[in-house]
Image: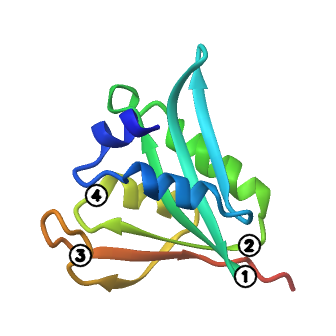
Amino acid sequence: MIAIERRAFATPWSLAMFVLELSKPSGICLAAEVDGELVGYLVCSRYDTVWHVMDIAVDPDRLRRGIASALLSRLLEHDPDGEYTLEVRESNAGAVALYERFGFKAAGVRPRYYQDNGENAVIMWRTPRRRA
């Protein structure tokens, strides 16, 4: 995970951050493998009644092959009626479009959220569909 994280992000999570998130009993960590090799992962934590997608990463050599979509799809199967949130870089149009395909909607901005360049984060939410 650490190797993918470092290749995928300008400001990667530290080992301590992974240990903290993965040690939470209410969290979910999903792995994507191809031929026994880790090619992507998703880390999600639950805070009260809301799932917070903390980290999704795919090996940069395996982008645009449906890996992130498969991870998100599997996550949403876990709690289809759950409420989910995440932050994403404003400049990451591909990720924003991916999240929108899964029903996430922009709901605000966290100014200067990313420490490496001060870029804003778009806050996105996926809320349950209310049944009539």
For numbered disc 1, what is the local secondary structure?
loop
Please state which of residues 66 and 50 is positioned toward the viewer in this rendering. Answer: 50
Q: List the residue tagged with mark 1.
A: 49
Q: Nearer the viewer, mark 2 or mark 1?
A: 1
Left-right relation of 49 to 22: right
**Position above or below: 113 against 65:** below
What amino acid is at disc 3? Answer: Asn
**Position above or below: 74 against 115:** above
Mark 2 vs mark 4: which is more N-terminal? 2
Mark 4 vs mark 1: which is more N-terminal? 1
Q: CA distance from mark 3 to mark 2?
A: 26 Å
Residue at image location 54% in from the left, 61% down from the top: 20
For numbered disc 4, what is the local secondary structure?
loop
Mark 2 vs mark 1: which is more N-terminal? 1
Task: Name the residue at the left extreme.
Answer: 117
What amino acid is at disc 4? Answer: Asn
Whether label 2 touches label 1, CB < 8 Å: yes
Task: Name the residue at the right extreme.
Answer: 132
Q: CA distance from mark 2 to mark 1?
A: 8 Å
**Position above or below: 82 against 130:** above
Whether label 3 touches label 2, CB < 8 Å: no
Whether label 2 touches label 4, CB < 8 Å: no
What amino acid is at disc 1? Answer: Thr
Q: Nearer the viewer, mark 3 or mark 4?
A: 3
Residue at image location 12% in from the left, 66% down from the top: 117
Q: List the residue tagged with mark 2.
A: 82
Q: Residues within 10 Å of mark 4 (few under 14, many from 20)?
A: few
x then y, percent, for residue 70: 61, 41
For numbered disc 2, what is the local secondary structure?
loop
Q: List the residue tagged with mark 3.
A: 120
x then y, percent, for residue 71: 60, 44
